[in-house]
Amino acid sequence: MRRRKLLHRALHTLSLQLKSVNSAYIPTPTPPTPLFSSPPDTLLVDKVISILKRHHPSQLDPLISQFTPQSASYLLLQSQNNQTLILKFLNWARELPFFSNHLQCRCLAIHILTRFKLYKTAQSLAEEVAVSFPDDEKGDLVFSCLKDTYQACNSSSAVFDLMVKAFSNLKLIDRALNIMNLAKYHGFMPSVLSYNSILEAIIRSTTRGYIELARNVYHDMMDNGVSPNVFTYNILIRGLCANKEMNKGLGFLEEMEKRGCLPNVVTYNTLIDAYCKMGNINDAYGLLKLMWKKNLEPNVITYNVIINGLCREGRMKETSKVFEEMRGKGLVPDEVTYNTLINGYCKEGNFHQALVLHAEMVRDGLSPNVVTYTSLINSMCKVRNLHRAMEFFDQMQIRGLSPNEKTYTTLIDGFSQQGFLNEAYRLLSEMISRGFSPSIVTYNALINGHCVAGGIDDGLEVIQNMIAKGVYPDVVSYSTIISGYCRNFDLDKAFQMKEEMIEKGIFPDAVTYSSLIQGLCGQRRLTEACELFKEMWKLGLQPDKYTYTTLINAYCAEEDIQSAIHLHDEMINKGFFPDVVTYSVLINGLNKQARSREAKRLLFKMLYEQSVPYDVTYDLLIESCSNIEFQSVAALIKGFCMKGLMNEADRVFQAMLQKNHKPSEAVYNVLIHGHCRAGNLRKAIDLYREMVHHGLVPHAVTVIAVTKKLHKVGMMEELSQILQDTLSRCEVIDGDTAKVLLEVNYKEGNMDAVFNILAEMAKDGLLPNETKFILQL
């Protein structure tokens, strides 16, 4: 913190300095300092040169005590045209006191190395100089020494660029600027390299006011007749984009083109990345197209940035198009490409596609990283496939990757949620033995595991243990305990815990209130639940979909359908779209009441300010939905299917088609599954064929539902075709054994085994099957 304050103060001072760069600091001219304060030992130097020409530098060790800084300086000057000898001497003398503690020796070496164009070695030595003389607060001594030794080494202004870069690399921006100003005053014109180094350091500092300081440096550069190059503009554009000044970044793109400075791939990558981080993927893709139009070939990084942006937005279908375009342009995906896509598919729940890409990258000799394996493990834990999760855990270690704290926490959470607490604690012990300290997230997973298993007291014990280890409970810890009490209908203790957390300065969140509301609703204490709901709003806590659904269910249980529908409308107005659970609750309430058309009309009222016409249909429901609200329509279809109301589900589906909204894979899968359960096999098969015709992939649950019905009615030809289609979609090598087993059992007529193998393949991610779809059916 202190360092950042000092840096901010320095930046403010420097900004003022730059605004009056020609008058802020006028040094008093001083006569050149003699190079040697005392005569060097020329005989010693001649002897050393002779040894270096013939022997290894270690042969000089006996002479260390005889060496002085003057002798070292004299040797450098005498040998300044012999690169081999200079390097041998520096390798030997660089760390020795007579050299390392003497500024003149180092400055002479920097001059000579720069003239030899050995910039990397010169840069390293310059950075050592920058930190070795702390009393030189502004860099004045360093500049004076470089100036005084300049002519003796027949040097060039490049040495000052190098010194400015050294200070800039070390974030010593004030000294870098001072060196540059002194150089200009003494007639050594710094090049664009100096300005770029300082700009880079300023932009990387990200301290308040850094953009303004960068602009001042840029204007000073222009005033001094130094032409910016593509690197200058790239640095400025990156800084502006990082500061969310996208329009100004685009302004520099336009300016550089007007000045005849052609943008390169880095320029466009920076802007594309900024657009993606802002969520403007379409604008990012527009820049990609512009690159091709200007015959500037995007690289792998360009496509990786766009793919990452799409993954962050959950637009996974579009990533496959970009991925194929990338390969079609001759670009080879790298580890970043695959890791990004695998993580994206895992978050979406499309574990099969994640596995396909995992197998592809391994086949191409690329290595998944720890984050990727943790994503795969997390996906398997979500579908409760702990065996497969542990397979990935073992596989990553075989590949030489060490699990991190998040990997262990993911597994601990997976085992805890299923009640396997012994295995969870075994993993906790292993995690600690490997040097990782359990985080609050780790402990919360264990607390949740105990509460799910009914062991609330054990959960409280975990809280005591974590406090003893210096990890303090947060709102999640307390909310988990409260939720456990509510599930056990022990509301007194739940509310006591709420008061306790407030006393300790931890304030309940929406989840805390939702748990308490659910507990009250479970005891049919609806009035108190509504009071808590109002309290949430007063505290600025926004109820979520879960809270609304709990109250809607409570109103339905009390046969107050009108209030339930009112909450449904409010929920949508607040931006929460009902899911299948919400609609199932409402449909249940309506069925229970055997309500007439008027009740159903209320169910389908969405966002109407005026009175709803009596003949409201599904068409009006569709009209009232924006694209994002089609999540609710899909949920409504699923709700009808789960209740066997297939006519209603079909009417919503047809209305979608009439409005030119293409149904997703999820909608087709739900409808097919629903018609199978309702005994409408012909309709299910027609939908299956229609789905495949549109290039959509039936999920494993759908395939199993259809094939079971086909087997039951003896339609073996159709069953065989669907099985062949399904197995052809298994693109993961791990599925080869299962495919063989399935084919053998099918030929032998052992259909129970066939269905079991399909189910296991789906569970292991060997067949297309979205996690969300599995969990909701």
Image (cartoon, helix red, strand yellow):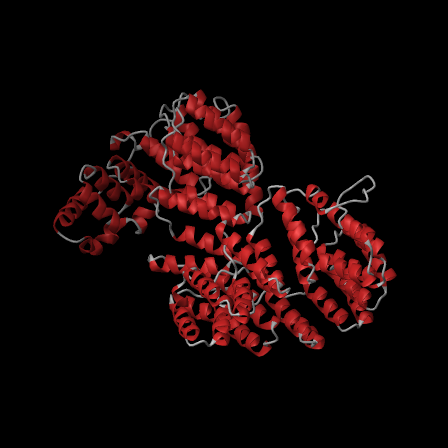
Work out whether 689 lies above or below 221: below
Work out whether 128 lies above or below 468: above
Could you tell me residue 262's position as x and y percent?
Answer: 38, 27
Residue 580 showing in the rendered view: no
User: Residue at the bottom extreme?
Assistant: 422
Could you tell me residue 346's position as x and y percent?
Answer: 51, 58
Could you tell me residue 330's position as x and y percent?
Answer: 33, 43
- Which residue is more in the foreground, 510 or 84? 510
- Name which quarter of the figure residue 226 lies in: top left
User: Residue at the right extreme?
Assistant: 527
- Name which quarter of the figure residue 145 lies in: top left
Work out whether 154 lies above or below 321: above
Which residue appears at 57% of the width and 65% of the height? 382
Left or right of residue 710, residue 44 in this image: left
> Which part of the image, by quadrant, shows the C terminus?
bottom right
- Name which quarter of the figure residue 679 lies in: bottom right
Residue 678 showing in the rendered view: yes
Which residue appears at 21% of the width and 48% of the height? 88
- Which residue is more in the foreground, 334 or 402? 334
Which residue appears at 31% of the width and 51% of the height? 95
- Which residue is more in the foreground, 429 or 264? 264
Left or right of residue 770, residue 678 in this image: right
- Which residue is more in the foreground, 241 or 211? 241
Could you tell me residue 697's position as x and y percent?
Answer: 50, 55
Q: How many marks?
A: 0
User: Residue at the left extreme?
Assistant: 54
